[in-house]
């Protein structure tokens, strides 16, 4: 699992080279008089946006192993047109998230000594890799001489939200059918997330690398305004910079209001 967690670093490098490969492949059909985008295309040179993104759960999709984590991101985006043709509109796309919240399940454990006396009781919280499972179990601790301490451990489930911020400065978007008001697109980013506490467990780190990729549709209300909706695979991991690195995989849904010229 520790070796798998190193893949985000390689994928971030691939994002940097991917646009040049795509540009070479698409240059042939677009070089015929396409040095400047046609006026009939729905495309903008500079685009600004505000977005809301949410994921209600996490699971092992590709590289992450922490389960039952939620994500909520609120932020802004900027796009710069690199190339616009009749088939593909290729853009740089970066995102900043001043509000990046991550939620972990919490096991709230109440341990009570049953035998022998004098009796004691204490409680503690634990953040598991998997989701919380409520219930009561009995544990025994040998004391020697055939005696044992018996404890009752009762688990109830809670949840904690961790405040953070993030940035995705390396990103690209490929929009197809730019003559139409409704355009499908592919999108991908690389960046980081910093949180006020370690996520997704206490022995993981506050600083995590992040990347995403996905697909969606953009609906142009006019040539200057549009609404984007997409669904992405989103991954967070600390690249082995902390004692534990379970990583988080989420399916992230995002809505963006965009404007520009």
Image: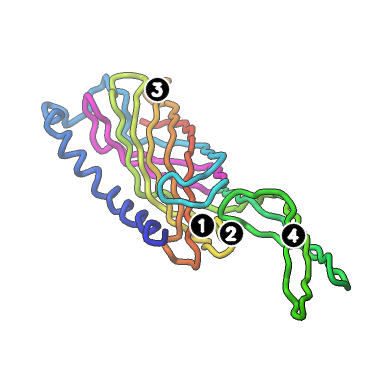
- What percent of the width, then of the height, locates residue 201? 57, 59
Q: Residue 196, which numbered label?
A: 2
For the residue pair 157 and 84, the one nearer the viewer reads as: 157
Kindly identify which residue carries mark 4.
138
Q: How crowded is mark 1: few (under 14 residues within 10 Å), some or many (20 or more)?
A: some
Residue 169 visible in rendering? yes
- Distance Cα–Cα, label 3 vs label 4: 61 Å
Q: Residue 90: within the magenta?
A: yes
For the residue pair 197 and 1, the one nearer the viewer reads as: 1
- Distance Cα–Cα, label 2 vs label 1: 7 Å
Do the CB atoms of the residues marked 2 and 1 lie less than 8 Å apart?
Answer: no
Residue 99 visible in rendering? no
- Distance Cα–Cα, label 4 vs label 1: 39 Å
Residue 146 falls left or right of residue 202:
right
- What percent of the width, then of the height, locates residue 50? 49, 37
Tell me the residue at 88%/73% (across/down): 118
Tell me the residue at 25%/38% (across/down): 82
Do the CB atoms of the residues marked 3 and 4 lie less than 8 Å apart?
Answer: no
Q: Residues within 10 Å of mark 3 (few under 14, many from 20)?
A: some
Kindly identify which residue carries mark 1.
194
SS at circle 3: strand
- What percent of the width, then of the height, locates residue 211? 40, 48
- Work out whether 12 lies above or below 111: above
- Distance Cα–Cα, label 2 vs label 4: 35 Å
Badge 3 or badge 1: first in the primary sequence: 1
Q: Among all residues in the image, which is located at the extreme right?
A: 118
């Amino acid at each position: 699992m520790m070796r798998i967690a190193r893949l985000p670093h390689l994928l971030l490098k691939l994002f940097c080279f991917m646009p040049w490969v795509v540009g070479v492949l698409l240059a042939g059909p677009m070089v015929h008089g396409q040095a400047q985008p046609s006026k009939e295309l729905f495309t903008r040179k500079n685009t600004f946006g505000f977005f809301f993104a949410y994921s209600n759960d996490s699971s092992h999709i590709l590289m992450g192993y922490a389960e039952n984590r939620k994500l909520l991101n609120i932020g802004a985006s900027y796009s710069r047109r690199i190339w616009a043709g009749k088939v593909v509109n290729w853009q740089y796309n970066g995102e900043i998230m001043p509000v990046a919240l991550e939620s972990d399940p919490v096991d709230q454990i109440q341990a009570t000594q049953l035998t022998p006396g004098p009796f004691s009781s204490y409680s503690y919280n634990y953040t598991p890799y998997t989701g919380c499972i409520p219930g009561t179990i009995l544990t025994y601790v040998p004391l020697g001489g055939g005696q044992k301490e018996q404890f009752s451990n009762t688990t109830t489930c809670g949840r904690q939200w961790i405040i953070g911020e993030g940035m995705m400065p390396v990103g690209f978007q490929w929009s197809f059918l730019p003559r139409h008001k409704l355009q499908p697109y592919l999108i991908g980013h690389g960046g980081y997330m910093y949180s006020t506490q370690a996520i997704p467990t206490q022995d993981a780190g506050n600083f995590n690398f992040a990347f995403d990729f996905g697909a969606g549709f953009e609906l142009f209300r006019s040539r200057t305004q549009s609404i984007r909706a997409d669904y992405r695979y989103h991954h967070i991991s600390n690249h082995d910079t902390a004692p534990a690195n379970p990583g988080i995989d989420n399916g992230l849904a995002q809505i963006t209001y965009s404007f520009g010229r």
